Image: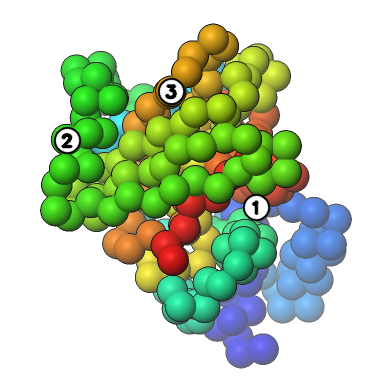
Amino acid sequence: MKPSDLASRFDELDAARALGDLSPEERAEWQQLVDDHGFQPDTGLDLLVAGLESTLPEATARPPARLVAKLEQETKAFMPASETVPPAESVESNADIISFWKHPALGWAAAACFGILLYTSEPSAPDEVDPAQARNALLASASSVQLPFAGLADYEGLSGDVVWADDSQSGYMRFEGLPANDPTVAQYQLWIVDPERDERPVDGGVFDIPAGEGEVVVPIRAALAVSEPVAFVITVEKPGGVVVSSQEIVAAIAQRG
């Protein structure tokens, strides 16, 4: 492996270490890079994560859409160039889609941290438009795409779709039959797969399904800009969501044909 590849790999592992997301195997790989090649942990990441954990509530809201552009600008310096980006046409199955995001990365870690910082530094305006009406308006626009959701395993009974527009970086998910969740136990989380941007998915936000509701429309709150998403994946995660999904429970997938 080239020195630049080793450095890039160490950055990925060190970001995961700072966030507490290293598996035992990755921890051993991180330690070997330190011992054999003299790489040193990034104390700046440690300080950033420690500061966030000490000042923010346990379940932090996702940054609103109006901060996406600023978040993108702030995180450019932290995003390593992807040397191998899978083309969109290589996504041929659910397994291919989920395999895009097996490991954490420095860019994602920095984006998550800066997203929290930006959100807490600026007040967010409440949504003024009814989600169902906003979805219908977006669906009527020529730039939007509509993809049906397919439920998996215990969620096969759900129906719905995702409406997304690249130009406005906005979208909505519509569900019927997605089981209600107890937000103190688990929450749904959206992941947006865009191999044109990166091989790792973009966090699309955490959401709940209230009990006794029929059709539910949920706004998409992408943490980063995406250019041409090929899939939208719903997982079930711990309250507040996660930075890297273990993919234990994948509830539904909507993907381009």
Q: Do the residues labelled 3 and 2 touch (CB within 8 Å)?
A: no
Q: What residue type is labelled 1?
A: Ala
Quadrant containing the N terminus in the rendered view:
bottom right
Callout 2: helix, strand or loop? helix
* Circle 2 residue: 137
- Examine the image and state in which quarter residue 221 appears: top left
Q: Which amino acid does label 2 sit on?
A: Ala
Q: Which of 3 and 96 is in front in this view?
A: 96
Q: How crowded is mark 3: few (under 14 residues within 10 Å), some or many (20 or more)?
A: some
How far is disc 1 from disc 3 in space, using C-alphas?
A: 38 Å
Q: Position of residue 62 (x, y in %)?
A: 42, 31
Q: What residue type is labelled 3?
A: Glu
* Circle 1 residue: 16
From the viewer's perspective, is the residue at label 1 or at label 3 nearer?
A: 3
Callout 1: helix, strand or loop? helix
* Circle 3 residue: 215
Q: Does 218 sit above or below residue 46?
A: above
Q: Residue at x 49, y 28 (%)?
A: 176
In this orientation, does residue 49 appear?
no
Q: Earlier in the sequence, mark 2 or mark 1?
A: 1
Q: Nearer the viewer, residue 124 or 202?
A: 202
Q: Where is residue 211 in the image (x, y as percent from the top left)?
A: 56, 11
